[in-house]
Image (cartoon, rainbow, N blue to C red):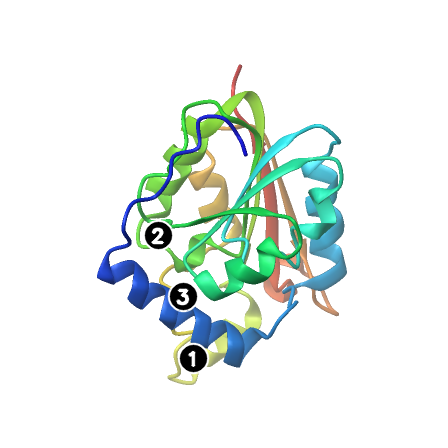
Amino acid sequence: MLAGAQTLGSPEVGLEQLSERYAEHNRVERGAGFIFAGPERVELFRRYVGGPGRTVLDLGCRDGALTQAYAGGNEIVGVDADREALAAAQKLGIETRWADLDDALPFEDGMFDVVVAGELLEHLRDPRRVISEVLRVLRPGGTFVASVPNAYRLKNRLRFVLGRKPEEDPTHLQMFSPNDVRALLGSFDDVQLHLIAGRLVSLHARLFANDIVFSGRKSR
């Protein structure tokens, strides 16, 4: 167990409800072991996390399906609101914390070499607050690697033109374009963006990519 990690107290009713909601959503919509934007995202996350010997905080880790890609030789703590998914992650040897990720993170300043947030920020009420918490718990020079759906891809724009909601997922509270991501990472150095996952990405990445993977480095 990482020194300095705090033990969560008795869960509030709100966290219990959140856990139930996401457990049902993940079972119905995702299924065990699901990784959105598959091999491309796995490879990019593995590259940016690096290792071995790194302390990694995985926010929104779910059942650990993606976490396994960068767990080897690294010390991982996974955090999620879905308690059922966390139980599966624990079976993979991942240390876990049950928490609402819209709240302050239960860790001390500068504890981690890397913070991961895969397909998480679109689910949160206040992504900027989470980013400030990421900066707090990262050590100087540490890496933040994350991903969000490319909400302004052509498919979603056409849905809007046809009078339909551009996002079908009821758990998505935010929509991100590449420019939105860059604005969110304004406090990071060496920001990198990758538009991935889509058969026509090579023709026009902003219109046809399904996902945005990005990373940044905390200033020393």
Q: What residue type is labelled 1?
A: Val
Q: Quadrant of residue 25?
A: bottom left
Of callouts 2 and 3, which one flags the residue occurring earlier in the amino acid sequence? 2
Q: Distance between the residues labelled 2 and 3?
A: 15 Å
Q: In the image, is residue 5 above or below residue 58?
A: above
Q: Nearer the viewer, residue 100 or 192?
A: 100
Q: Distance between the residues labelled 1 and 3?
A: 20 Å
The picture places residue 177, in percent across and down from the top left corner, at: 49, 54
Quadrant of the frame with the N terminus: top right
Q: Which residue is drawn at 28% across and 54% down?
A: 11
Q: Quadrant of residue 166?
A: bottom left
Q: Which amino acid does label 3 sit on?
A: His
Residue on which disc 2 sits: 100
Residue placed farthest to the left in the image?
Answer: 13
Of callouts 2 and 1, which one flags the residue occurring earlier in the amino acid sequence? 2
Name the mark nearer the viewer: 2 or 3.
Answer: 2
Q: In which quarter of the image is residue 46?
A: top right
Please tell me whether mark 3 sits on a helix, a strand or a loop. loop
Residue on which disc 3 sits: 172
Name the mark nearer the viewer: 1 or 3.
Answer: 3
In this image, 60 relative to 207: left or right?
left
**Label for residue 161?**
1
Q: Which residue is drawn at 64% across and 66% down?
A: 208
Q: In the image, is residue 72 above or below residue 119?
A: above
